[in-house]
Image (cartoon, rainbow, N blue to C red):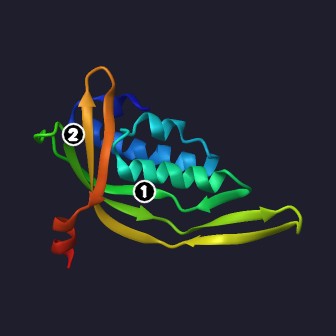
Amino acid sequence: MPEEAKEFSADGYEAFVEYWFEAHDYGMQSGDTTSLDDVSNEGCGFCLSRIDDIDGVNSGAQWVFGGELIADDISASMVEDDQGLYAATFTMRQVPGSVYSYDAAENEVTVVEEIVESERALLFFAFYDESNGWDAAAVVEDSAVEEESS
């Protein structure tokens, strides 16, 4: 993880959000979710869902091409809520891609799933601990941002 992403500051938190998505995309391409798991709290449903999805795709003779998630326009609030969480708003873009499968018996590659381009306004919540740094706690739809853009 980049040093900046370990800092307790708005810039550090924003760098952490970017790193989380880089770890996600690395897991999608390589099948190794260790880095993503290391920065995701065990109570983060979105995080666990993404890790499970990646593990599921990479458990068989499947692989992903494209489909990266990109966090744009990140804005971190350094105000701690009553649960000890910090929030950051951002736009998550997913680039197009495909999930492929190889059938050895037929010696054939097929497209299992098309990943369509999309964009959503989300909130990223994280804990900060001086000894461990940032830890993703939740990623949810940002209804306030959604309403403003309607």
Left or right for 6, reference 84 = right
Position in image of residue 76 (x %, y %): 21, 46
User: Exactly how many numbered labels are in the figure?
Assistant: 2
Q: Report the quarter where the N terminus lies.
A: top left
Q: Residue furthest bottom?
A: 150
Q: How far separated are the C-alphas under marks 1 and 2?
A: 19 Å
Q: Identify the residue position indicated by label 1 in the image.
A: 70
Residue at image position (38%, 53%) is 46
Which residue is depicted at the point 62% across and 56% down? 57
Which element type, helix, strand or loop, lies under badge 2? helix
On the image, which quarter does residue 144 sit in? bottom left
Going from the N terminus, do you reach mark 1 or mark 2 first? Answer: 2
Q: Which residue is drawn at 31% across and 33% down?
A: 134
Q: Is residue 26 left or right of residue 125?
A: right
Q: Image quadrant of residue 79?
A: top left
Q: What residue type is labelled 2?
A: Ala
Q: Tell me the kind of residue under disc 1.
A: Ile
Q: Please provide percent x and percent y for residue 87.
A: 20, 47
Question: From the viewer's perspective, is 133 left or right of 31?
Answer: left
At 30% from the left and 20% from the top, the residue drawn is 131
Q: Can residue 15 be seen in this view?
A: no
From the image, tell me which residue sits under label 2: 10
Above or below for 111 versus 36: below
Q: Is residue 44 above or below residue 106?
A: above
Element under disc 1: strand
Circles 1, 2 touching at the beta carbon (< 8 Å): no
Indicate whether 70 appears above or below 95. above
Q: How crowded is mark 2: few (under 14 residues within 10 Å), some or many (20 or more)?
A: some
What is the number of the mark on residue 128? none
Q: Foreground: 123 or 84?
A: 84
